[in-house]
Image: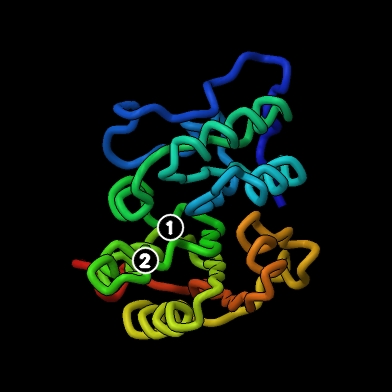
Amino acid sequence: MTMPPSLDETAPGPPLEILPGQLCGRLSFPDLFGRAAPVEIEVGIGKGRFLLQQAETRRDVDFLGLEWSLKHLRVAKERAERRGLRNLRLYRADARHVIADLVPDASIARLHVYCPDPWPKKRHRKRRFFVPETVPHLERALAPGGYLHVSTDVREYFEEILEVLASRTGLLAAADPLFTDEAARSGTHYEEKYREEGRAIHRASYQRPAGAARHVGGLPS
């Protein structure tokens, strides 16, 4: 197996944070990270607990973290800079737009979406990440054999996620050998917080079939 090239930890690199206006059209991950390597995205990184731990321990993978809260993004950026992480980029943006409009086809090894905002008020439900208009793009963005990991503490939202993924994508429920136990997955800040409060965390993992066709159901061919 060919390993991705190592990043030169001594050479000056591009800034961790992607600024508004820097991205135009589909992303080029080799240009963004300076090498060709597997890419994983976390949607809603909070203060970066999970993402930074993954980037620090898996240097052969490049990570893109998406977060709307500027306050949280700044905290994650400061922590990443202190750790000297070169395989990480952070972007403040609506994750639905990034996945639908910026991420190239079949380019992502793993998508992580942990405890997304459930937007409990009925009039706000359209703001949820897992909606019929968005989920086909999750499948499109995943490389064949790639994984989608989901968690939420809201049972009703979890059931809705399962339903929309089943009806709008060809993703299959599947265990990811890299995240078969809790320790390997290293829970996010909100997962730990909710667990301490006694809330149940509902989880699911999906895989895009390795032999999946390029065309994705629910999207124009």
Note whether 99 is above or below 74 in the view shown. Answer: below
Of the pair 75 and 31, the residue shown nearer to us: 75
Which numbered disc, 1 or 2, marks the residue that appears first in the sequence? 1
Image location (x, y in percent) of residue 184: 77, 62
What amino acid is labelled 1 in the image?
Ala
Residue for point 56% across, 51% down: 40
**In-image side of 113 versus 199 (left or right):** left
Q: Secondary structure at mark 2?
A: loop
Q: Quadrant of the C terminus?
A: bottom left
What amino acid is labelled 2 in the image?
Trp
**In-image side of 81 versus 132 (left or right):** right
Image location (x, y in percent) of residue 134: 31, 65
- Residue 119, numbered circle: 2
Q: Is residue 51 at all visible to an observer of this figure?
A: yes
Q: Is residue 104 at all visible to an observer of this figure?
A: no
Note whether 128 is above or below 204 in the view shown. Answer: above
Quarter location, residue 204: bottom right
Q: On the image, numbered disc 1 is attached to which residue?
A: 106
Whether the residues at callouts 1 and 2 have beta carbons within 8 Å, the answer is no
Q: Residue furthest left?
A: 220
Image location (x, y in percent) of residue 34: 55, 28
Q: Secondary structure at mark 1?
A: loop
Residue for point 30% across, 50% down: 97
Residue for point 49% across, 52% down: 44
Quarter location, residue 153: bottom right
